[in-house]
Image: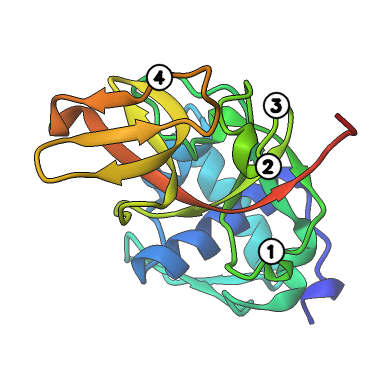
């Protein structure tokens, strides 16, 4: 049973990355990918945590294969969601939004409580989306996606800056619209400057406004 496995925070981070890689990519990560994603200086640190996870019965390692990591815990095991969802803070230009460097904390909320299961929570800054109930300081539940339809509320990176806006795709242009008349639309003049990071699928209110 998943609940019988006791892990340190560092081991949990490694296990979570393995599970996420399998869920999203269909294969486990390499030692080098684990080290890079979690900020380890060498693959030896990743290997040490992997060996500890194997001793605790969470994974099985297969020698001689760069991705020889077998997860013994169901990738979609509901017990694992007890860990919660990572909260993403300020996002730096050029660094993936779900990078470990941006994770401030983990909120103990089960992802399956949302109609669409999110991958992470993003701290909302500003009042540009208050018209749809997304307020400053809220935690926005986000589903990782690289594509979106016109009308979707998206987390988008434009020229290196991350913003939450409503996507509007017209015949000759793409706009990112605020839900507050105080903010002008953002016109995306260069399609290559726009990267969709995810879709908004829910909101957690952290305090009374």
Residue 56, visible in the rendered structure = no
Q: Which residue is mark 1?
A: 111
* Residue at mark 4 to residue at mark 1: CA–CA distance: 33 Å
Q: Is residue 88 above or below residue 14?
A: above
Q: Camera-side residue: 191 or 146?
A: 191
Q: Which residue is mark 3?
A: 136
Name the residue located 65 percent from the left edge and 38 percent from the top edge: 134
Q: Residue 115 in the image: x percent, y percent?
A: 63, 70
Mark 1 vs 2: CB contact within 8 A = no
Sequence-first disc among 1 and 3? 1
Q: Camera-side residue: 17 or 180?
A: 180
Q: Which residue is mark 4?
A: 184
Q: Which residue is mark 2?
A: 133
Label total for image: 4
Q: Residue 160 in the image: x percent, y percent?
A: 33, 21
Sequence-first disc among 4 and 1? 1
* Residue at mark 4 to residue at mark 3: CA–CA distance: 18 Å
- Looking at the rendering, in which quadrant would you find the N terminus? bottom right
Q: Characterize the local packing of mark 1: few (<14), some (14-19) or many (20 or more) Cα atoms within 10 angstroms.
A: some
């Amino acid at each position: 049973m998943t609940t019988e496995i006791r892990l340190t925070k560092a081991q949990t981070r490694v296990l979570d990355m393995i599970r996420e890689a399998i869920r999203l990519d269909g294969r486990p990560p390499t030692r080098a990918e684990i080290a890079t994603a979690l900020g380890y200086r060498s693959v030896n640190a990743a290997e040490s945590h992997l060996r500890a996870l194997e001793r605790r019965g969470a994974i099985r390692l297969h020698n001689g294969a760069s991705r020889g990591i077998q997860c013994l815990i169901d990738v979609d095991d509901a017990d694992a969601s007890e860990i919660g969802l990572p909260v993403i803070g300020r996002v730096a230009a050029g660094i993936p939004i779900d990078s470990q460097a941006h994770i401030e904390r983990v909120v103990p909320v089960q992802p399956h409580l949302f109609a669409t299961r999110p991958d992470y929570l993003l701290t909302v800054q500003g009042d540009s989306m208050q018209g749809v109930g997304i307020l400053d300081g809220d935690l926005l539940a986000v589903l990782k996606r690289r594509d979106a339809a016109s009308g979707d509320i998206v987390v988008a990176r434009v020229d290196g800056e991350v913003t939450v806006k409503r996507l509007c795709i017209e015949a000759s242009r793409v706009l990112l619209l605020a839900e507050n008349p105080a903010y002008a639309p953002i016109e995306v003049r260069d399609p290559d400057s726009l990267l969709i990071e995810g879709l908004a699928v829910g909101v957690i209110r952290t305090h009374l406004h």
